[in-house]
Image (cartoon, rainbow, N blue to C red):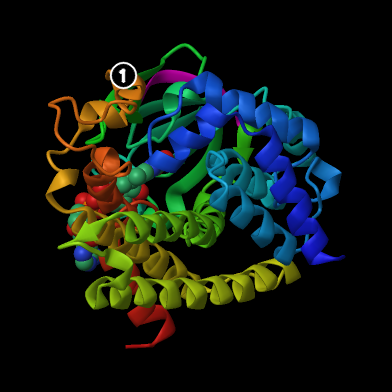
Amino acid sequence: MDLQAFRLEVRDFVRTQLPEVVREKVRLGVELSRSEKREWEVRLRDKGWIAPSWPVKWGGPGWSPEQRTIFLEEMSINDAPEGNGLTFEMVGPILITYGTPEQQQRFLPRMVSLEEVWCQGYSEPNAGSDLASLSTRAVREGDHYIVNGSKIWTSNAHNSDWIFCLVRTDPQAKPQLGISALLIDMKLPGVSVQPIIGIHGWRYFNQVFFDNVKVPVDLRVGAENQGWTVAKGLLDHERLNLSRVGENRRRLARLQRVGETVHEAGVLLRDRPWFRRRYRELEVRLETLAATVMRYRRIAESGEGLGPDVGMLKLVGSRLVQDMENLTVDAIGPESLPYDKAAHSQWGPAWPQLDDPHPQGLPPRNEYAITAASRRFVSRGYTIAGGSSEVQHNLLAKQVLDL
Ligand SMILES: Cc1cc2nc3c(=O)[nH]c(=O)nc-3n(C[C@H](O)[C@H](O)[C@H](O)COP(=O)(O)OP(=O)(O)OC[C@H]3O[C@@H](n4cnc5c(N)ncnc54)[C@H](O)[C@@H]3O)c2cc1C
């Protein structure tokens, strides 16, 4: 495979197929509408690129780790919307690994055709870092489970058709040994979804409630009470995915542009030593992370299985996001304040306002100023999602460094 030719093919596709308004919104960090996201996903689906890490057998392109990395980089650098990671990088791979043939036949084709979108139901109001203490209960009654309880921080649940859910099937067993993984149809009677509005004004999170929801036993993934093994498999995929190399490339490109457009006492920031030093440090950290992620993708590809050390990728990638957003705000300075929630959200008077970002007749704000502060606030969640940094440090200390 000629990787350079492949890169150019992907670049050409995204540059010619991505609508200009969507590209601008992604570049500036403004929320996309559901239809804008959908339109882009349809184009990827029609091209056969909607599930970049899947094998050909299940509708993926069967790419090598190098091709996948190039694809994600080009998508990100050229300001394409983020892919639906929960469906294609988490639940899909779990079903490919642990699903029954019937489950695979039933669900995988409907993922790639975009008929069904998935979300992840792990966290609960009293079970986050200590996930094994989860208490959503599933009681077996014949060929069904009756599910009661609640999941929280469920990203994109309001747009999802199915939820991949961890439930307690044996309350007497040790916490990890009494959990099962269920595939639950969000349209079933007894499932309800309440919004949680994020600091950026977007509806991203939700709380999902289960009130006597009747779930067929054949929608359990793995054996009863073996859900922890399946859950850990999903977390490995999640942590590899959460290394955020592509996204960080876009942030670095944003910073480069800030350096080329923002002046400090008449001097462009790119010529200021403090900015150059911080920019270069971030660049080196990103390249180091990218090389390491590639190594882990090859391990995952070989079927060897990922060890607990994969957690360091998420640690490093999420910290990098925060440091990039911090530098953006520091570089733009007071112009990036006050925090402009409305501009960041499609619910506010957002998009038209970007054409006239400084209504008081003052000099125009930097193009990134309008969303810089909200992006910085939102980046705080990156070291929490998928397992907090504190907990990741503990795991690495115990399981990898043997401390
Ligand atoms: C952007 C985002 C998206 C998310 N999407 C989803 C989703 O789709 N589905 C889903 O199920 N969940 C989702 N979550 C939830 C996420 O998995 C939890 O927030 C996370 O596991 C932490 O749990 P918690 O919020 O209950 O915090 P807690 O576990 O209560 O932790 C609170 C604080 O205490 C610290 N802490 C806890 N235990 C220890 C310890 N043993 N040692 C040291 N420090 C400790 C933590 O680091 C943290 O700072 C998402 C979260 C975010 C931020």
Element class at badge 1? loop
Q: Is residue 298 visible?
A: yes
Front-most of residues 43 and 111: 43
Left or right side of 110 for 368: left
Q: Is residue 1 above or below residue 40?
A: below
Front-most of residues 35 and 103: 35
Identify the image quadrant of the C terminus: bottom left
Magenta-drawn stretch contains 215 = yes
Magenta-drawn stretch contains 365 = no
Residue 334, image x, y percentages? 12, 49
How many residues crowd mark 1 within 10 Å: few (<14), some (14–19), many (20+)? some
Q: Is residue 351 above or below residue 108?
A: above
Q: Main secondary structure of the magenta part?
A: strand
Residue 129, image x, y percentages? 29, 55
Residue shown at 45%/31% (left/top)?
Answer: 139
Q: Which residues are magenta?
A: 209-217
